[in-house]
Image (cartoon, rainbow, N blue to C red):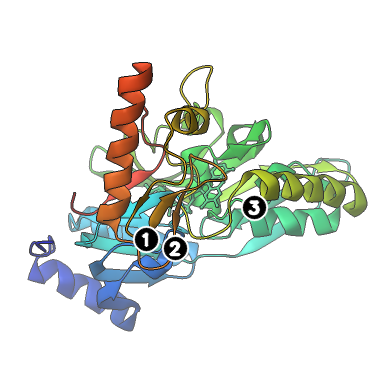
Amino acid sequence: MNKKDSLLTRAQIQALRSSFGEDLAQDAPVAKYTTMRVGGEADFLLNVTTSAGLEKAVRLCWTEEIPFILLGAGSNVLISDAGIRELVILNRAKKVEFRDRKDEKPLIWAESGAGLGSVARRAANRGWSGLEWAEGIPGTVGGAAVNNAGAFGSDMAEDVHMAEILHLDNQEIRRVQWSAEDFAYDYRTSLIKRKEVDAVVLAVEFILERSTPEEVKKTMSEITKQRRTKQPPGSSIGSMFKNPLDDYAGRLIERAGLKGTRRGDVEISPQHANFFINHGDATADEVQALIKLVQQVVEEKFDLRLDLEIELIGEW
Ligand SMILES: Cc1cc2nc3c(=O)[nH]c(=O)nc-3n(C[C@H](O)[C@H](O)[C@H](O)COP(=O)(O)OP(=O)(O)OC[C@H]3O[C@@H](n4cnc5c(N)ncnc54)[C@H](O)[C@@H]3O)c2cc1C
């Protein structure tokens, strides 16, 4: 693990310090901000708690050319053991507003750092239907919008009414509104995820249907039951690989005989082979060793390359 020098210059660090003071931490452990709980330190980590703060931070980064990585709940990323040399912006902007409109469908507006599952549960308490599928997804609203998170036959592409976006285009930073179409969604991806634009999600407005709390909660508890039977407990990043066309990554890994394989403290779950579980002190290198093993064995056996659904961040 050879840690390289920070990518930030002294002038950039100074600009961040004078704008954000104590919200900027140095040599900050990042594992605790991820669901897999592995990875090293960020040279600099900035905690933002409002969408205005997120906008201010990203504007400064783009203006001063500060390289940065935006982290939501860290439930779709694997951080390297050597950590992160870019600035990490930790999005904890969690404000949520419920917009009940007479004779129209209800709307929920949520800052992008709000937990998707928590928004879904609060919608259920009001009897607003549409986000039941999101119960149990540990990501933020912003991470879900970028990834086109989905489950049980539904996804963000179906529920996003409008998103507030900060967009860098030809040196100009603009705050714009996107519809779901503007994200150019596909399976677990979007324009932003594919890095076809420089943009961050500040907030998302969801459009829902009126139902009753009982009905919505009933569907959610069925979803929770199904998740419990399929999804292994413990620290993971969810599905490691994308499902190939007309098949399931988990099924292929299982048929390759790799369920239960371990490297150090990481195990390919015996319950669901597309989940890798950190049993305690796993390292990112151990996770990567298992990723490579799976890709190699599945390719040898089925002549098919499994692509990562998760993102590798840091020094690999
Ligand atoms: C137990 C478990 C179950 C899961 N189940 C599902 C499931 O059923 N369906 C599913 O789709 N996924 C599932 N996931 C994966 C994950 O929760 C989703 O992909 C989620 O949308 C990621 O959100 P996040 O906030 O954690 O993003 P992060 O992991 O923090 O970030 C992911 C990427 O999005 C970018 N990003 C984050 N926020 C923003 C923003 N505001 N603007 C621009 N870019 C941003 C980051 O820079 C990074 O590139 C599961 C994960 C776990 C651990």
Q: Nearer the viewer, residue 109 or 295?
A: 295
Ligand 1 within 8 angstroms of badge 2 C-beta = no
Q: Secondary structure at mark 1?
A: loop
Q: In this view of the protein, can residue 129 be seen by the observer?
A: yes
Q: Earlier in the sequence, mark 1 or mark 2?
A: 1
Q: In this view of the protein, can residue 305 be seen by the observer?
A: no
- Local packing at callout 1 (Cα closer than 10 Å; few below 14, some 14-19, many 20+) is some
Residue 291 percent across, percent down from the top left: 32, 41
Relative to 55, residue 295 above or below: above
Residue tagged by mark 2? 279
Residue 275 percent across, percent down from the top left: 48, 45
Determine the residue located farthest toward the front in the rendered image.
257
Proximity of marks 1 and 2: CB atoms separated by less than 8 Å: yes
Residue tagged by mark 3? 136
- Marks 1/2: CA–CA distance: 5 Å
- Marks 2/3: CA–CA distance: 20 Å
Amino acid marked by disc 3:
Gly
Ligand 1 within 8 angstroms of badge 3 C-beta = yes
Q: Secondary structure at mark 2?
A: loop
Q: Which label belongs to residue 265?
A: 1
